[in-house]
Amino acid sequence: MTPESIHRSAAPAPGAPGRRVPKTLAWLAGAALLVGGVALLSSRGGDGESSDAEAGGTAAASQKAASGGRGHGGRAGAGGTHDEEPPPPRFDEAVCWRELERFDAAVTLENFRAWAAPLLASGDSLVADYLAERLTELIGQDPGRASQVLSWARTAGPDEFDVLLTALRGSEAVHHAQVATQLLAQGMDATLDGGRRAGILSALDTQKRFEPAALDTLTAFAKDPVSGEAGWAATRTIARVMKRDFEAKGNAAPYMDALLAIGTESPDEQIRYLALSTPMHATPVLDEHTRARYAKVLTQEGSPDGREAAAHNLSISGDNQQVLELFAQAFAREQETCVRWALFRFAARASGREALPVMANMAMADPRFQPIYQIFEQLYASGLHDFVRLWNSLPDQDPFGCLVGHD
């Protein structure tokens, strides 16, 4: 469990030389060899109906010859008594594996849907993974191909839709401005159902950055009272692109503004919580304006989860003394035990050993925290200063059952 855990349950052409074999197909090929081998050993042969059956008979005959020609096990003792072994299990032929090999060799973008349909109907998740990976290769860097796949997604059934959007999301073409613009427009299309719009907007989350216009569109949509599942997906997409842009030395401020706007204005509590909590995965240093907005969330947000998220984000804001004073005031007013636990431990994250006097006052106000305060005091006295090491040294990171179900 990490200290960030603060909340409760919430292509090349087909056949081209040197083309990389998809890793899923390679796995399936291994499985095919294994299953095929077992099928050969277990086949009785003799019916003359297939070459597979004949091969099975030959393999069985060879096996018998190697063991004395009688099909029995090894000798049990000096007297040579043979113990009868149970027959090996029989397996149906793995037709789908052979079909995948043929599919991989000859599929094109034009015939993909028709060829993929019977394989997808198997319901095998590994087959679906392979189909998505193969389609990603077929799309490649071509924005025209990506647009074609997106057009299929409008009417595709649920399983095919997942394959199409997974492939599109993983392609190089998705970073083309034309494709990103089309995805955003389709995600805003009110004639599509919410789940389909959510999937389309999620395919944008591998973008390297968002232009201001796209960010404004996603933010306004996520705040819409009727955005529902798609609004939640839009919020998550903003957060994921913020993390990628920030790690690439970009500017997190526009994304933080967007997430705070969603986190304070959306009427949907789950969307608000997601918007308030996701910045902790990027951990940007907050400017004074953003700190003030999170401080307001800490005291006014109706959701305890949202207040916990605000406590975390403020603890890495860079103004230790101001944060300690804010946490002390919030602790005195707070009624939720889990929010108090967040304020207590994140005081240590914000200021280290210097937070001990504030934490001692918290423990005086709420005696349940006195044993925990003593542990923090002892750990600091032992020479621990880094919060992550201190957190990992706690005998119980979840004394009030606030982190159940979270990493």
Image (spheres, helix red, strand yellow):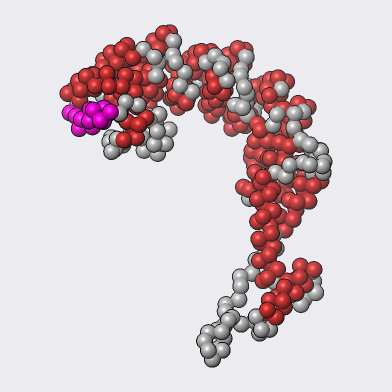
Q: In which quarter of the image is the C terminus?
A: top left
- Residue 342 higher or lower than 80, as above or below: above
For the question of whether residue 146 can be seen, the reply is yes
Q: Extreme bottom residue here?
A: 79
Question: Where does residue 228 sit, x and y in percent of width and height?
Answer: 52, 26
Q: Which of 379 and 95 is in front in this view?
A: 379
Q: Nearer the viewer, residue 95 or 63?
A: 63
Q: Nearer the viewer, residue 379 or 49?
A: 379
- Residue 142 higher or lower than 329, as above or below: below
Question: Where does residue 257 sit, x and y in percent of width and height?
Answer: 49, 13
Specify the segment rendered in magenta: 367-383
Question: Where does residue 75 sit, x and y in percent of width and height?
Answer: 56, 84
Location of residue 405 by image quarter: top left
* Residue found at x 38% / y 23%: 312
Q: Main secondary structure of the magenta part?
A: helix
* Residue found at x 76% / y 46%: 104
Q: Which of 66 and 290 is in front in this view?
A: 66
For the question of whether residue 272 can be seen, the reply is no
Q: Extreme front residue here?
A: 383
Q: Quadrant of the N terminus?
A: top left
* Residue found at x 69% / y 59%: 33
* Residue found at x 65% / y 56%: 31
Give the side of residue 216 with respect to residue 280, left or right.
Answer: right
Location of residue 343 by image quarter: top left
Tell me, yes or no, whether the highlighted magenta stretch contains residue 93: no
Question: Where does residue 303 sit, x and y in percent of width and height?
Answer: 37, 24
Tell me, yes or no, whether the highlighted magenta stretch contains residue 380: yes
